């Protein structure tokens, strides 16, 4: 027992605060996986790209966005661990908003949570297999196209901070459909 008592102060030093102990999910700084788990209630673990297969038989999976669903980005050279995010709003057939962590840099660092970010389906068949994501550093859709496995639907309740009280639907549509360069936004 004395040995355990001596270890207790050391354990306190290595304990990492979880999103559950944060004042708000939006104060989270860290990886996308724990954030998506806390925001969606979907209890999967491991690298983001593995969530699609892990969900098979445990959660409903499909290729249509739904509020509270986790979108699973494929593993690529640019995303070696994949990425997961939670759908916060449906804007229209090819434009949704998502809430996620560890995408854009904020104050020079990655890991921060972002709420109601534009996600645009740029897949040739409008099936959400390829997307573009709003990127804070350019204040618009980033230049990359990311392959997506699909959406995982959970049965649990989503976090209250998943979406804001006044999401910018017009801004999301402008991000998706009004090209800055004069070139159509697509692949």
Image (tube, grey):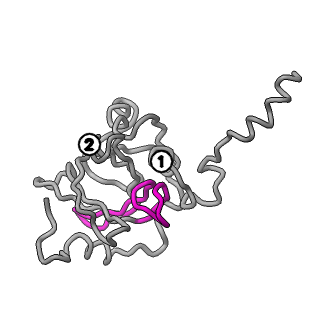
- Which label belongs to residue 3? none
Where is residue 28? Give x, y as percent.
55, 56
Residue to which mark 2 is pinned: 76
Q: Quadrant of residue 181?
A: bottom left
Q: Is residue 5 left or right of residue 86?
A: right
Residue named by callout 1: 31
Nearer to the camera, 132 or 95: 132
Kindly indicate the quadrant of the structure image that contains residue 183: bottom left
Q: Residue at x 73, y 35 (%)?
A: 11
- Answer whether residue 99 is magenta in the image: yes
Magenta-tinted stretch: 88-116
User: Farthest residue toward the right?
Assistant: 2
x%, y% of residue 9?
80, 37
Specify the quadrant of the image occupied by residue 58.
Answer: top left
Examine the rendered structure and indicate whether residue 95 appears above or below residue 178: above
Q: Residue at x 46, y 42 (%)?
A: 42
* Figure check: 3 above or below 8: above
Q: Position of residue 90 (x, y in %)?
A: 33, 63
């Amino acid at each position: 027992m004395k040995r355990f008592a001596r270890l207790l102060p050391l354990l306190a030093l290595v304990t990492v605060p979880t999103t559950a102990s944060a004042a708000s999910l939006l104060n989270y700084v860290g990886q996308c996986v724990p954030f998506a788990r806390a925001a969606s209630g979907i209890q999967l673990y491991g690298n983001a790209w593995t969530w699609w297969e892990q969900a098979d038989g445990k959660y409903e999976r499909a290729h249509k966005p739904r509020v509270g669903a986790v979108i699973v980005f494929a593993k690529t050279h640019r995303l070696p661990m994949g990425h997961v995010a939670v759908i916060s709003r449906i804007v229209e057939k090819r434009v949704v908003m998502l809430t996620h962590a560890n995408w854009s840099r904020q104050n020079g660092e990655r890991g921060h949570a972002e709420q109601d970010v534009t996600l645009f389906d740029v897949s040739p068949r409008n099936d959400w297999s390829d997307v573009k994501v709003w990127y804070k550093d350019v204040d618009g859709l980033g230049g990359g196209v990311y392959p997506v496995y699909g959406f995982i639907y959970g049965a649990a309740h989503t976090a209250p901070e998943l979406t804001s009280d006044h999401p910018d639907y017009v801004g999301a549509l402008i991000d998706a459909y009004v090209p800055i360069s004069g070139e159509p936004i697509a692949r």
